[in-house]
Amino acid sequence: MSTYIQSLYHVVFGTKNYTAFLTKHNEQDLYRYVAGVLASHKCHPYIVGGYGNHLHLIFHLHPDVALSRLIRDIKKASHEILKNRKDEYYLFPGWQVGYGAFTQLIQNKDTLINYVKKQWEHHKKMSFKEELIQIYREQGIDYDERYLLT
């Protein structure tokens, strides 16, 4: 018998102190880089996107990969790139300590991808903090607001 796993994740993390650093001019390079880090860990990235001060990642987690280690590696690797490209990402203050990770039904994949694609529209109506609270409530996650974006 073989092992079969369906591990679709939606991961969200932001910058320290809500600091916006992404623009329409610099975001795609970062998204491609993070997708490459996911792929290098044998994970399948469907989309990496975000808005201003945070990222959304929709991907399949490979069964040999620990989620916490993967997110640590993504943050560490992208932090180095962003700090080395100060001319493009001069406002980047570093990533927040935590992250939100949510398992998803495969049937929701296309909806999640479209949600990430429309982040610039979405955030005309809602802040990152409001978005996190909404996601946590939808997922039934208890949270402490003091630690949402630390």
Image (cartoon, helix red, strand yellow):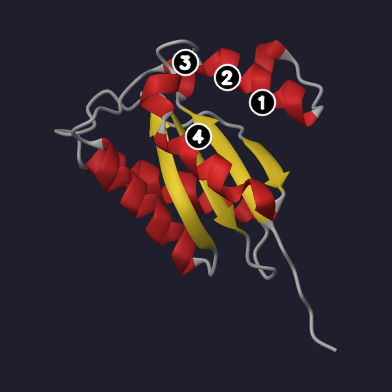
| Mark nearer the N terminus (3 vs 2) | 3
Residue linked to disc 4: 115
Q: Which badge, 4 or 2, is on the more N-terminal residue?
A: 4
Q: CA distance from mark 4 to mark 1?
A: 12 Å
Q: Position of residue 19 (x, y in %)?
A: 39, 17
Residue 11 horizontal/vertical position (percent): 59, 41
The residue at which mark 3 appears reads as 17
**Alpha carbon distance from label 4 to label 2:** 12 Å
Element class at badge 3: helix
Q: Residues within 10 Å of mark 3 (few under 14, many from 20)?
A: few
Query: Could you tell which of marks 4 and 1 lies nearer the N-terminus?
Result: 4
Q: Are marks 1 and 3 in contact (CB under 8 Å)?
A: no
Q: Quadrant of residue 101?
A: top right
Q: Quadrant of residue 147?
A: top right
Q: Amino acid at mark 2?
A: Glu
Identify which residue is drawn at 46% across, 32% down: 95
Q: Residue furthest left?
A: 87
Structural distance between the alpha carbons of marks 2 and 1: 6 Å
Quickly name the residue at label 1.
135
Q: Say what secondary structure mark 1 lies in.
A: helix
SS for callout 4: helix
Type of the residue with mark 1: Ile
Q: Residue at x 34, y 53 (%)?
A: 33
Say which of 22 and 140 sits in front.
140
User: In the drawing, does residue 146 fall left or right of residue 93?
Assistant: right
Q: Which mark is residue 131?
A: 2
Q: Report the quarter where the C terminus lies.
A: top right
Q: Secondary structure at mark 2?
A: helix
